[in-house]
Amino acid sequence: MTEVPRLLVNLKTYSQASGVKAVEIARQAEKVWRETGVLIGIAPNVLDLKVVAESVDIPVYSQHVDPIDPGAHTGHIPPELVKKSGARGSLLNHSEKQIELHHISVAVTKLKELGLSPIVCAPTPQESAAVAALSPDAVAIEPPELIGTGIPVSKAKPEVVQNSLKAVIDVNPNVDLLCGAGITSGEDVRAAIRLGSYGVLVASAVAKSPNPYEKMEELVEPFVEITRA
Amino acid sequence: MTEVPRLLVNLKTYSQASGVKAVEIARQAEKVWRETGVLIGIAPNVLDLKVVAESVDIPVYSQHVDPIDPGAHTGHIPPELVKKSGARGSLLNHSEKQIELHHISVAVTKLKELGLSPIVCAPTPQESAAVAALSPDAVAIEPPELIGTGIPVSKAKPEVVQNSLKAVIDVNPNVDLLCGAGITSGEDVRAAIRLGSYGVLVASAVAKSPNPYEKMEELVEPFVEITRA
Amino acid sequence: MTEVPRLLVNLKTYSQASGVKAVEIARQAEKVWRETGVLIGIAPNVLDLKVVAESVDIPVYSQHVDPIDPGAHTGHIPPELVKKSGARGSLLNHSEKQIELHHISVAVTKLKELGLSPIVCAPTPQESAAVAALSPDAVAIEPPELIGTGIPVSKAKPEVVQNSLKAVIDVNPNVDLLCGAGITSGEDVRAAIRLGSYGVLVASAVAKSPNPYEKMEELVEPFVEITRA
Amino acid sequence: MTEVPRLLVNLKTYSQASGVKAVEIARQAEKVWRETGVLIGIAPNVLDLKVVAESVDIPVYSQHVDPIDPGAHTGHIPPELVKKSGARGSLLNHSEKQIELHHISVAVTKLKELGLSPIVCAPTPQESAAVAALSPDAVAIEPPELIGTGIPVSKAKPEVVQNSLKAVIDVNPNVDLLCGAGITSGEDVRAAIRLGSYGVLVASAVAKSPNPYEKMEELVEPFVEITRA
């Protein structure tokens, strides 16, 4: 099983984080990991998945997979081909790509059968508990109203993180909790850790940063502090 | 809160169980309830919902609701208008009408805020646990490969019912478990009860029966036996 | 074949135009039709479809149908049951309920086979032409950015109406053109007619009016004027 | 504008036509093109799109694009990133990836604005005419009931091809017609050409062939014959 990253960077389909820039950010993430020992994962857009996966040793995630096997499925993304492309896991049910419950369930199962790591997103404590019941490796809690705002969930809605954590543990204590939405600074990450998060899921903070390398250094620093302590 | 029926009859969009026939079956269900004391619920197609609800005193369920408030939503089915039509609850996420996890969650919340009873369908123990985390009044477990086959889940896959029951109780002990798919006889219902089901969800067994009244009498008999015992 | 109404009133899922209020507006529409001879159609929410259809002699439309026959389709709306409920046709592909091209095509065919009248919505001249190729009875052109604004398409975007009309005629001269979005006054209807519209599709102007009867009288007046001229 | 290929090879998500095998088939297609002058296009799965596009000079197509610009759209496929990956166009609305009419329309427009070539699939003459109204570069007619059967549409349903051709020309004479479904031999291609097809869309015939190079040679031969004649 792939260890769940402490920092998972979702590059979405941002133009400024695609193509050669996606590879560059992934290499910077790898460098930060080598320097700090804090595991970083990268989720590039699906068109860049293979080239990013071939460029780095840190885990690379698809942003979505369809609940199907390879075959006559024009335009779909089977987990098996995601694995063949070098990915180590996939996000599922991101608030920008919500899917049917049954599709989440089948995709989680298929990913795990292939040795890939499913990380399922959810917007509320209740839905975090629901997806935890499907036994993914991690649940990423992201209140969609905070995504892209720069208002960190760990500060604006600490109870959402705490309740999600409690709900997830109650249902399935083996599932790690990431928190996301609005996280832009080391300070936000520190707050997330204090609330019990295993790690954080970020997007624009890194993808749109003038200096993604420095930003990632800042975001993993709180995890370094934990290790030191 | 509406008590969860022991027997929930889904009329689907069967032509032979629509219009005046839907009302007739609902009245027969009401009669069986009066005679036996075993609560029966009816889920007619949405076009027949209001006329059925106006015709009987047993609880009537919508087959689906959209996760929205009334307003500019052409072609949708808001829970508030379902309530206004006289329904007492709604099925959600039937295997023939699967929806996004977030839509299930929002619809459950809206139904409960309106005093309506949400009953969420799921095809596997894992998904039963997942939807139980959303706190509906009941979860209806139906392996889709058995739906309409006449092979009862309570006999063909007793472990599915047992595991679902266990999974649901672990996540949320306040949620009742119905089991469905292939249930056509009192014997099948007895098996379901032995496995721990609170009640059963049936469709073609009643909707396509030459004598729905007798069929419902047969299907509730095991619940009468329990009461007597 | 049902004659296409000059004024088609979409009640959407507005609370204030549902239940007894839906029936009341339909009866007022019928009265205006009897007084003026201008045909008015009503599209209530699906839960109210049957009771509205049973209350009036003017054509009643579903707001949506699924491209299926009756059967094991929990939560769906088959054209055949819409017919059984007394409807004379259905809207399809409203901008608030957009569907796959193939579903529009199959639904149009099923409606026509049943003697029901399909009226397909489209937001642009190109898409008006596309749906005209499927031979519905009418195409309703509604730029979604104007829906509910009170800014009438017939005045804000006269070229959209004109280009749609031209495009529809080129593809299929037997298809009537309705125009909608932002139409709230007799003056707006007059502009629509001048641009070549056969009729108009309105929603909030009537559904939210303090006096739907007077509003409908105002909206059909331009059609009366044509007849007189 | 990219010239529409006479032979468009859809690799779907077949495992045996993914990864290095996708690149190999694309290079063989390029070789056949160089030897015969008949233009061949390749549509690999989206994970392989970039590596295939970088490997060959023949046009490479995405199997699907979403109707969006780059940005906060996790898990989606924006036309702009498809272009950046080196694709020259995209299939849209394949019967295995059907989308809303409005999404086809917006995607066609975005592709054309970017100088990419949209090829829209449709299963019937009516829907071929509908999508022709959206002015893609080509319409690919594929009755889904024949896909993967080896029964060629050009022989089993010649009237479907002829009626589609007529319908497309009537609506938009600038749109090329491809025909697909069940085409596995040069003989099938010859039949398609006789019916008026500009080219053919194939999948399993090449993707699952033990010798894709020879199969493509066979499939383009009828186009060579035309040029000679």
Image (cartoon, coloured by chain):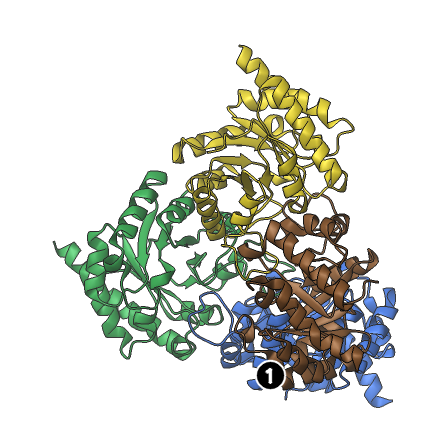
Chain colours: A green, B yellow, C brown, D blue
- Pick the front one: C147 or A11: C147
Q: Is residue B113 left or right of residue A3?
A: right
Q: Is residue A122 visible?
A: yes
Q: Is residue D198 visible?
A: no
* Whole-percent x, y for residue A185 in the image: 22, 67
* Whole-percent x, y for residue C16 in the image: 54, 56
Circle 1 crowding by C-alpha within 10 Å: few under 14, some 14–19, many from 20? some
Q: Chain of mark 1?
A: C
Disc 1, SS: helix
Residue B35: image quadrant is: top right
Q: Is A24 located above or below residue A59 in the figure?
A: below
- Pick the front one: D111 or C38: C38
**Residue at 77% of width from left, 85% of height from top?**
D173
**Residue at 75% of width from left, 30% of height from top?**
B209
- Pick the front one: D91 or D217: D91
Residue B201: image quadrant is: top right
* Whole-percent x, y for residue D162 in the image: 86, 74
**The residue positioned farthest toward the top in the image shown:** B229
Q: Is residue C38 left or right of residue A3?
A: right
**Residue at 67% of width from left, 24% of height from top?**
B216
Q: Which residue is mark 1?
A: C155
* Whole-percent x, y for residue B135 in the image: 42, 39
Q: Is residue A6 left or right of residue B82?
A: left
Q: Is C196 located above or below residue B118 in the figure?
A: below
Q: Is residue D20 left or right of residue B205?
A: left
**Residue at 84% of width from left, 79% of height from top?**
D196
Q: Is D67 located above or below residue A101 in the figure?
A: below
Q: Amino acid at mark 1?
A: Lys
